[in-house]
Amino acid sequence: MGPAKILEAAHVRRLLLHVQHTRNPARNRVMVLLSFKAGLRACEIAGLDWSMLLRPDGRIAKQIVVSDRIAKKGSGRRIPLNPELSASLDQLRRYQAFPRDGPVVRSERGAHLTARSVVNWFRRTYAELDLNGCSSHSGRRTFITRSARLLIKTGGSLRDVQELAGHRSLTTTERYIEGDRDAQRRLMRLI
């Protein structure tokens, strides 16, 4: 089995429409956006706590503070919050009666989901949509690839993508980035 499939924007929109009709639409939308708009791993989605998202006044912060305790290999980081994700987190927080701590992504009993539960949820959801080759890591790979492609517009570097991804090595980040044949053809016409 190869690396998780990267999704096009239309597939992500389809995924977000699909989760609107699930048992926990606000929670499930946040799970999708944490994966695609923040690049979080399944273990980070499962371990995310409201205290990592809130300002001292209790409002949603402008960044996610991924603590070392939930990050792979203890590589915590700060990720600026995407506006769409921020709005969805705000909606979920209202639905959950404005918690200041505790799990963001809750099980039916109100506890943190396990990383395995997050992985299984994504697997089932992708299967329901016939998105073959996708896994819980597809959002993360899509996030890293899209971030790398958009760097030229921001003046950033691959080092910025590496830090957002929480990778210790740039070579790890590079393995996540999928090439774009159309962009390569356009580039060759300019040379």
Image (tube, rainbow, N blue to C red):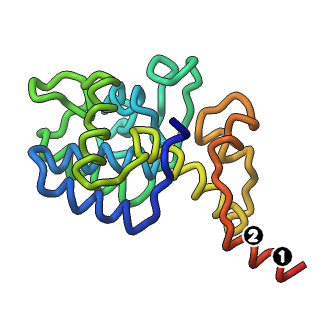
Residue type at numbered disc 1: Met
Whether residues under marks 2 and 1 lie with C-beta atoms below 8 angstroms apart, the answer is yes
Instruction: Answer left or right for 138 relative to 18.
Output: right
Q: Is residue 102 visible?
A: no
Quadrant of residue 180 within the rendered picture: bottom right
Residue 130, quarter of picture? bottom left
Task: Find the distance from the CA under tag 2 to the CA under tag 1.
Answer: 6 Å
Give the percent coordinates (x, y) of residue 81. Answer: 45, 50
Q: Nearer the viewer, residue 183 or 38?
A: 183
Is any atom of residue 29 visible in this view? yes
Q: Indicate whether 191 appears above or below 119.
A: below
Name the residue located 29 percent from the left edge and 57 percent from the top edge.
Answer: 15
Query: In this rendering, is residue 181 above or below 98?
Result: below
Compared across the picture, whether 88 is left or right of 33 comes to left
Position of 78 with respect to 111 (left or right) is: right
Vertically, is 150 above or below 117?
A: below
Of 10 and 51, which appears nearest the observer? 10
Relative image position of residue 80 (x, y in whole percent):
51, 48
Question: Label 2, on which residue?
Answer: 184
The answer to whether 153 appears left or right of 191 in the picture is left
Judged from the image, the secondary structure of the residue bearing numbered disc 2 is helix
* Secondary element at image label 1: helix
Residue at screen point 65% across, 49% down: 177
Residue linked to disc 1: 188
